[in-house]
Image: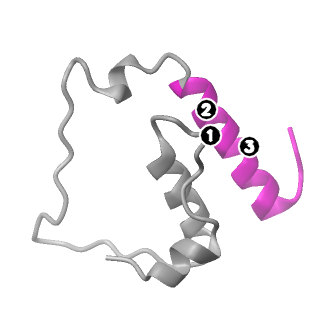
Amino acid sequence: MIRKELITRVGGYDENAYSIDDYSLWLKLSEIAKFKYLEDEVYYVYRRHPASLTRTDKSRFETKQRLIREAIKRRYGFDF
């Protein structure tokens, strides 16, 4: 669960992160909020199959690298 205000505060999903927009959102949220690991119960189930975007998106690796560079720039103020 998450507060809508937090999603709004970080600018929501990155529409340029085609198949990993959730990864982008989690990176941005981690900069302004604390995450808590909930033990003992499953709250989310992740399903993958051969035709999923996670497996078929060829630009996924490059997009992930871009998101990580952007997060480092936001957090520490430098590019690499």
Mark 2 vs mark 3, CA separation in Å: 10 Å
**Callouts 2 and 3 close, C-beta under 8 Å:** no
In the picture of the structure, the residue carrying the numbered disc 3 is 69
Judged from the image, the secondary structure of the residue bearing numbered disc 1 is loop
**Callouts 1 and 3 close, C-beta under 8 Å:** no
Taking 54 as reference, is 49 left or right? left
Q: Is residue 20 highlighted in magenta?
A: no
Q: Position of residue 17 (x, y in %)?
A: 57, 39
Judged from the image, the secondary structure of the residue bearing numbered disc 2 is helix
Give the residue at the far front of this rendering.
15
Labelled disc at residue 16: 1
Q: Few, some or many C-alpha atoms within 10 Å of disc 1 (few <14, some 14-19, many ≥20)?
A: few
Name the quadrant of the C terminus: top right
In the picture of the structure, the residue carrying the numbered disc 2 is 63
**Callouts 2 and 1 close, C-beta under 8 Å:** yes
Query: Mark 2 or 3 closer to N-term?
Result: 2
Discs 1/3, front: 1
User: In the image, what residue occupies the spot 82% across and 61% down?
Assistant: 76
User: In the image, what residue occupies the spot 11% across and 71% down?
Assistant: 40
Discs 2/1, front: 1
Q: Quadrant of residue 68?
A: top right
Amino acid type for the residue under numbered disc 3: Arg
User: In the image, what residue occupies the spot 60% across and 62% down?
Assistant: 28
Discs 2/3, front: 2
> What range of the chain is rendered magenta?
60-80
